Image: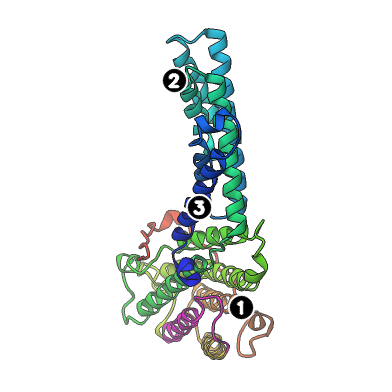
Amino acid sequence: MRQFLARWPRLGLAARTALAATLAWVVALNLPGEVPHTYPYFAPLGAVVGSYSTVRSSVRNSVLAVAGILCGALLSLGLSQVLGRDLFVIPVVVFLATLLAGWRVFEGQGSWVLTVGVFVLVAGAQHPVRYALAYCTLTLLGGCVAVAVNAALPSVPLARSERALRQLAVVLADQLDDLAAGLRYEDPPSAQQWEQRLRAVTPVRESLRATRQETEESLRGNVRARRNLDRVRVQHRAGVTLENVAVRVEELSELLVEVQTPADRGVALEAGLRWPTAAALVALARLLREYPDGDPDARVLDERLRSVRGHVQHLSAVEHAAHFQTARDRQTAGAVVTSLRRCLGALDPAAAETPDPEGVPPTPWARPDPQRFTRHRVRRPSH
C-alpha cells in the first residue's frame, strides 16, 4: 500500500484532505456556542485550504489564507460602517480588495481578500460580525486540523524524485546517442539535420531541481523524516551530479553542432577524430542509463565508468597525435576532449582528480558568436 501511494502521491494527498475535512467538520459541530453550529462548513473549508503535500506548505498556506480572510472581513466590515450597506459599498469593497489581493505578502492566497470581502457584504448581510468571526475562526480551526493530519501522516515524494532523475538521465543519454549518430556520417549533417538531434535539456533539469526542492521541504516538520533521510541524501547527490552533467552535455552539444555544421570554413573534426568521439559519447550514454534511480548497481556502474574513461583516454591520445591544419581545429578537438573529461569528472570525482597519462592539458574553447549562426530549435523530450 505504501509503495502504491508513493507511486501515486495525489491519492495520498486526496485521502489526507478528506480525512482532515471530516475531522474538522466533527470538531466544529462539537464546539460550544451558536457560531460553530450555524456555520460549521467553514471548518472543512479551512481543512481543504490547508491540505498540501508537505507540513511546511500546509502551515504557510493556512496562515496566509487566514490572513487574507481576516483582511477581507475587516475591510468589508469597516467600509460598511463608514459608507453604509447600500449599493455603493460593493464596488468600493471589490476595488480595494482586488488591490489588496495583489499584495505579495499573501503570495498565492490573496484571492481570499476579495472572496471574503464580498461574502461578508452579501451572504452575511444579516449578521456580518458573526459571519466574519465564523469565517476567520473556523477556517483557522480547519487549517490547524489539516496541519495536524499532515504531521501525523507525512509524505516524502521519493517516487516522483526518482522519476525526475530517470527522465533527466534518459534525455541526456538520448542526446548523446543522437550526437554520436551524427558524427558517424561520412558527410556531416546539415544545420537542419542537427536541429532535429537537439533536445530540450534545460526544462527537464529545472523540473528535477524543483522536485528535489519539494522533497527537501517535505522533511521539514516531518516527524518521520529520519526513516527517509538516507534515500533523500542519495537522490540529492544523484540530482546534483546529473545537473552538472546536463550543463556539460549542453555545452558539448553546442560545440559539436557548431563545429560539425558544414560552412565555408570547413568542418573542424576530421574523420579520425569523429569516430572516437562518437564511441566516447555512446559509452557516456550507457553510463547515464545506469544512473537514473540515484542508486545504481556498483559493479555495473564501475564497469561503465571504466568504459567511458578508456574511450576518453583513447580520444585524448588520438587528439594528441593528430596533425591539424589550423589552430582552430586543434582548439576544437581539445575542447571536445575537455568537455568529455568534465562529464566523466562529474560522474566520477576520482577520475577528475587523476591525471590522464595519455592526454594533454585542457584546451579552452571560445563560445561562437551567436550573430554568425542561426539559432537552433530544440526538440522537446517525449513524456
- Queried whether the magenta region covers residue 18, the answer comes back as no
Is-magenta flag for residue 279? yes
Which region is colored magenta? 272-298
Name the mark nearer the viewer: 3 or 2. 3
Q: Which residue lies under the disc numbered 3?
A: 19
Disc 3 crowd rating (10 Å Cα; few below 14, some 14-19, many 20+) is some
Residue in front for this viewpoint, 367 or 103: 103
Q: Distance between the residues labelled 3 and 1?
A: 49 Å
Q: Does the rendering let one see residue 103?
A: no
N-term-proximal mark, 3 vs 1 = 3
Mark 1 neighbour class, 10 Å CA radius: few under 14, some 14 to 19, many 20 or more:
some
The three-letter amino acid code for the residue at tag 1 is Gly
Do labels 2 and 1 touch, CB within 8 Å? no
Identify residue for label 2.
Answer: 122
**Residue placed at 45% from the left, 55% from the top?**
14
Q: Nearer the viewer, mark 2 or mark 1?
A: 2
Q: Mark 1 points at which residue?
A: 345
